[in-house]
Amino acid sequence: AQKITQTQPGMFVQEKEAVTLDCTYDTSDQSYGLFWYKQPSSGEMIFLIYQGSYDEQNATEGRYSLNFQKARKSANLVISASQLGDSAMYFCAMRERASNYQLIWGAGTKLIIKP
Amino acid sequence: DSGVTQTPKHLITATGQRVTLRCSPRSGDLSVYWYQQSLDQGLQFLIHYYNGEERAKGNILERFSAQQFPDLHSELNLSSLELGDSALYFCASSPRTSGSLRADTQYFGPGTRLTVL
């Protein structure tokens, strides 16, 4: 079974609109961490945001926020007021004790922002 | 800029050859990870070093080896190269491997794009 599922292979969004990228995960651990990374066409992998399983508040970093729904095991990334520079691949990843805390990656979502 | 450096940025070589990829972690980070990203396999974890010691192995081929030196830089050696080894190779670093492991964020270098002809 997939540990991290990103169901949207690709998305087109109009500039300035908000966008939600889906991520669901599967773990039996109580303590785990969830991460989002951005990979632009230039190739580098950029850390965006982190959410811990015990964190009571949803994580926010500037225009990025994480909609964490623990019971549903979802950790969706929300980008507010999208910009052309947000066009990139976005990866969701998880660390859990069951996997020796190695990062487990989703397949990614390709986001294209239209002007 | 994540603070992780990787050299070279691009590498073109022939099948059967051997190459060495180099990584310098962020200042103060003790953990180094290597990943391979190819179009058909996605992002694959290869190996993890912490303060000079190997901590975990992922899908690393026997033709590949790595080490972390006392100054904490790391090298990934790829030998008997095949066409299928063409990929983007990332190094990432993180501060620690104990304590709040679930929160230990990995910061990635710019990658080395390897092309095997």
Image (cartoon, coloured by chain):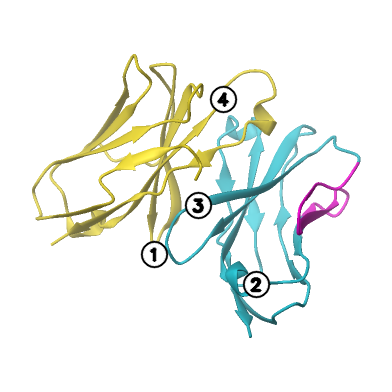
Classify the position of the N terminus of chain A by image quarter: bottom right
**SS for callout 3:** loop
What residue did someone put label 2 on? A8
- On the image, the x and y values in percent for residue A94 come to 65, 44
Q: Chain of mark 4?
A: B
What separation in Å lies between label 1 and label 2 (alpha carbons)? 17 Å
Label 3 to label 1, Cα distance in Å? Answer: 18 Å
Q: Is residue B62 above or below residue B96?
A: below
Residue B26 or A111: which is nearer the viewer?
B26
User: Type of residue at label 2?
Assistant: Gln
Residue plotted at (37% across, 49% down): B111
What is the quadrant of residue A114 in the picture?
A: bottom right
Q: Which chain hosts label 3? A: A
User: Which residues fall within the magenta stretch?
Assistant: A57-74
Mark 2 element type: loop
Crowd rating for badge 2 (residues with CA inside 10 Å; few <14, some 14–19, many 20+): some
In which image quadrant can residue B61 be found? top left
> Which quarter of the rendered picture does the C terminus of chain A lie within?
bottom right
Label 1 CA crowd tier, 10 Å (few <14, some 14–19, many 20+): few
Q: Which residue is mark 1?
A: B40
Residue hosting label 3: A45
Chain letter of the residue carrying label 1 = B
